[in-house]
Amino acid sequence: MNDDVKQKNAKLVRTLVFVVVAMFGFGFALVPLYDVLCDITGLNGKVASVAVKEIVYPVDKDREVSVEFVTSLNESAPMLFRSETKKLKVHPGEYYTVNFYAENLTDKVMVAQAIPSISPGLAAEYFKKTECFCFTEQTFKPREGRTMPVRFVVDPNLPKQYKIITLAYTFFDNTKTQ
Amino acid sequence: MSAVVAEHDGHHHDDHAHGPEKGLLRWIVTTNHKDIGTLYLLFALTMFFVGGAMALVIRAELFEPGLQFVEPQFFNSMTTMHALVMVFGAVMPGFVGLANWMIPMMIGAPDMALPRMNNMSFWMLVAGVLLLASTLFMEGGAPAAGWTLYPPLVLQTGKALPFAIFSVHLLGVSSIMGAINIIATIFNMRAPGMTLMKMPLFVWTWLITAFLLIAVMPVFAGAVTMLLTDRFFDTSFFDAAGGGDPVLYQHIFWFFGHPEVYIMILPTFGVASTIIPVFARKPLFGYSSMVYATASIAFLSFVVWAHHMFTVGMPIAGELYFMYATMLIAIPTGVKVFNWTATMWKGSMTFETPMLFSIAFVVLFTLGGFTGLMMSIAPSDFQYHDTYFIVAHFHYTLVPASVFILMAAGYYWLPKWTGHMYNEKIGQLHFWLSVVSVNILFFPQHFLGLAGMPRRIPDYAVQFADWNMISSVGGFIFGISQLLFLYIVIDTIRGGTGEKVSDEVWEDAHKHGLEWTLPSPPPYHSFTTPPTVIPTEHI
């Protein structure tokens, strides 16, 4: 192999290695890109993780939407977690408060985070919470049990085809990552 | 359309004209493209049997409903390991082996552009696969989360997780190095007169495949690195508790995964386009359209990934986009299938074993392609998703396609590589056993999937019993038939039929590729002076 070819090879290899490194970076760039896309489009049932201001909507008394509350624990987190209401018929535009109960079953301080999810996903942007225990991590003393409210409103602009909305919370035990 | 036998190395005595080293060390330190090609091919063949044995564990367990032989956790490990071993240990190295052996000989180069890196990528592959295999013996067992390694399930793997992830890193680095080497060889080492549009299609398809590899393997490496940090360093890429999202992994994985499945099929197309013209005794129909079709398929593979995730809850616009984009792939693929058919049309065909495997490939790959089209229809996909229908689909595009073509390539080039003729009778027996049993094995899985049998389960409802039993019977016949291939490979290396093969082996093959202008077997160093006349029959 003559020097000319060797030089051409070295140059090409440098370019290709650069492509490889760039594509490795691109894989990581997909993470923020994905979040941005989900935020813009409101896809994936992702709901706002901060409280919205309580504004007064015209209440649509003629329309009823069922809201279901589902609770679960991730990887058998050592907790009790339930909703005090399983199902509620609501009028769009009216504010409601539902209580959830969570209890630390261990003898240690526990830090836990509840993650909400709404289905159908496309209804998520019409479901607004002014108060929720899911906005921040919750700290539980040993064996502490606590009732926590969620205050929400269903936006009257919710398209007509949505008759049932399911709000699911999963509690994650984050104690170890503190 | 004529070819002149190029000058062979035997006549040269410059200081590079030495033979291989003696003894076992030759195979460890070799930088010769033919040696490394042989290593890759033998490694792939070994892994084909290892992965096949794992598949037979799966089929044995599924022979009857109920749990008979293995624990569900081990069963799930088997599906993961079978897939990873077959993809990264058998099919990909098989084609890299062919590339190592054939690309320098096809383009008139003395060796690969980067011979030392070539050696290193082979041994990293071995290390990667051994590391992967070692997870079988670890506490908590080997990964058991499909070949896709979706979180959160894969994060529940026991001690094996970091080993599996590092093994993926090694396999990735190995194939990226192989790809860089192939691109450098094709760009810089072609003989004078071998313009890009005169290259054999096998070289073309590998060039495009190599670009796919360097584009997507790093993305996969990134995805598994995120799994690693999620598990051990408290990041939350895919962990909802910290604001992550498991669906994100699916997007990143399939951004890699869809091009990955084409990495396994594009070289297959290349070999088929090489073999069919020789045995049809006609030039390939539509050479340039084949090149452009390959490039189009490669391009489209980057923009269709979410058709693997129609059921995650995408909005209707996303489903429609990915549905139509996926259907578009049928067009360049159709171009290829019609080209092969047109090549055979009115050809003076003979049916030696390589041709038989290639014809079976055209027919059965088309069948696998059609079920792919069915699944591209988003509303229908909800029925097929995660059932045995998808298992049947991708096995049709991998086993009677990629694997059959690897077999065809073996039969086609073994006489060139060894200088001995294989036993045609046993070859044909191997073909007929394979082609019948592969259909007994995979065709019933379509019915099972449509009836609703989920994939990756060790036990199933009794309604699925009959077809599972038939499928398992096919599986065992197929598995055992492959021992014939092993026999033929060993027998041919050791002398085969004893018949002395000519340089071109197959009638008029010298018109189809430079490799047939070399002696059989070719000298250890070939084309140290570039050939002067380039065969153009394939164009």
Image (cartoon, rainbow, N blue to C red):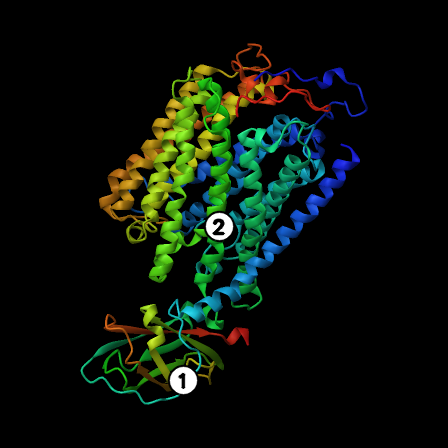
Chain for disc number 2: B
Closer to the camera, A13 or B330?
B330
- Residue A105 located left or right of residue B536: left
Location of residue B518 with respect to B334 vertically, above or below:
above
- Circle 1 packing at 10 Å, graded few (<14), some (14-19), many (20+), is few
Closer to the camera, A161 or B80?
A161
| Image mark count | 2
Give the residue at mark 1.
Answer: A52
Q: Quadrant of the N terminus of chain B?
A: top right
Tell me the element at label 2: helix
Chain for disc number 1: A
Of the two numbered discs 2 and 1 in the rendering, the one whose residue sits closer to the viewer: 2
- Mark number, residue B312: none
Question: Residue B166: horizontal and vertical position, in percent?
Answer: 59, 52
Tell me the element at label 1: loop
Question: Residue B411: horizontal and vertical position, in percent?
Answer: 50, 22
Whether residue B278 is visible to the viewer of this picture, yes or no, is yes
Type of the residue with mark 2: Phe
Task: Judge if badges 2 and 1 mark residues of a common chain.
Answer: no
Whether residue B68 is visible to the viewer of this picture, yes or no, is no
- Corner quadrant of residue B194: top right
Q: Which residue is the extreme one toward the right? A: B15
Question: Residue B363: horizontal and vertical position, in percent?
Answer: 36, 30
- Circle 2 packing at 10 Å, graded few (<14), some (14-19), many (20+), is some
Q: CA distance from mark 2 to mark 1?
A: 39 Å
- Corner quadrant of residue B206: top right
Give the residue at mark 2.
Answer: B302
Location of residue A22 with respect to A174 vertically, above or below:
above
- Corner quadrant of residue B235: bottom right
Location of residue B323 with respect to A156 vertically, above or below:
above
Closer to the camera, B61 or B3?
B3
